[in-house]
Image: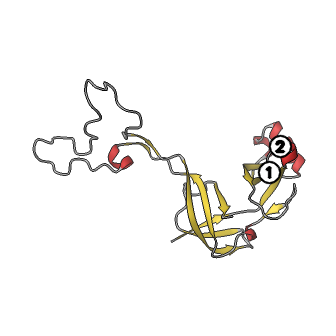
Amino acid sequence: PCTVIQAGPCAVLQVRTEEVDGYKAVQLGFDDKSEKNVSKALAGHFKKAGSTPKAKIVEFRNEFEHEVKVGDQIIVDMFNEGEYVDVTGTSKGKGFQGVVKRHNFGGVMQATHGQHNRLRAPGSIGAGSDPSRVFKGLRMAGRMGGKQVTVQNLQVLKVDTEQNLLVVKGAVPGAKNSYVIIKKWN
C-alpha cells in the first residue's frame, strides 16, 4: 500500500539568516491562490519574492544541504527512491467519541449479570472522598482526531519529476487533498 503526494513545485519566498533573523531557515510556498483572497501584507510578501500568492506557507530550519535563494523553485527531484522521510499533517477529525473508540477501552464484554445498557461505558473514574476530584489526564470520552500527527520512517518508492509526484510506502495523516509537510532524514 502506498500514498501518492504532489510535492511541488514550491517557491522559495524568503531565506532567513543568522545575522538578520537570528536563525537559519527557508520559507516555502505551495499551491497557487487567488490574489483577491490574500491580505495586502501577504500580497507584498509574495510580490517581494517574485511569486504568485500561495495557499500554504511553511518554514524549514536547516533542511537544505545546497544553497537556495529567493525566487527559486524546489521540485520533487530533491528526494531519492529508497530513502526515508517523515510526513506531518492534520489527522482526520472524528468528532466526539466514546472511550471504546477513542482509547480502546474494552467495555463490558458480556451482557449478563444485570448489565442493562453499560456495554461501552467507561466505568469508575476515581475515588470518593479522598482525593474528592478526578485526576487530570484521565482518559475519557471527547473530541478525537483533528490534531497534528507526524508519521516517521516512510519509504519513498517512486519519484515522478515530470508531474512532481512522490509515492510513499504506507499511510499519510490527513484527508484527501489536505496539505502535508515532508521532511528528509539528515
Secondary element at tag 2: helix
User: Residue 75's x, y, as percent?
Assistant: 76, 66
In the picture, measured across the screen, residue 107 lies left or right of residue 69, that is left
Badge number at residue 24: 1
Q: Height in image: 77 above or below 34? A: below
Where is residue 2 shown, x and y percent of the image?
A: 54, 70
Quadrant of residue 181 in the image? Answer: bottom right
Rendered view: 147 above or below 173: above
Residue type marked 2:
Asp
Front in this rendered view, residue 6 or 110 = 110
Image coordinates of residue 87 in percent, x first then y, are 60, 59
In this picture, residue 75 sits left or right of residue 114: right
Residue drawn where x is 82% and y is 51% of the image:
13
Identify which amino acid the numbered label 1 is placed on: Lys
Mark 2 surroundings: few (<14), some (14-19) or many (≥20) residues within 10 A? few
Q: Describe the element under mark 1 as helix, strand or loop.
A: loop
Q: Which quadrant of the figure contains the C terminus?
A: bottom right
Residues 105 and 145: in front is 105
Q: Does residue 167 appear left or right of residue 99 in this picture?
A: right
Q: Which residue is mark 2?
A: 21
Give me the C-alpha separation between circle 2 and circle 1: 8 Å
For the view shown, which residue lies furthest in the front direction?
Answer: 130
Q: Give 168 or 66, whichever is nearer the viewer.
A: 66
Taking the image as shown, residue 96 lies to the left or right of residue 185, namely left
Mark 1, Cα crowd under 10 Å, few <14 / some 14-19 / many 20+, is some
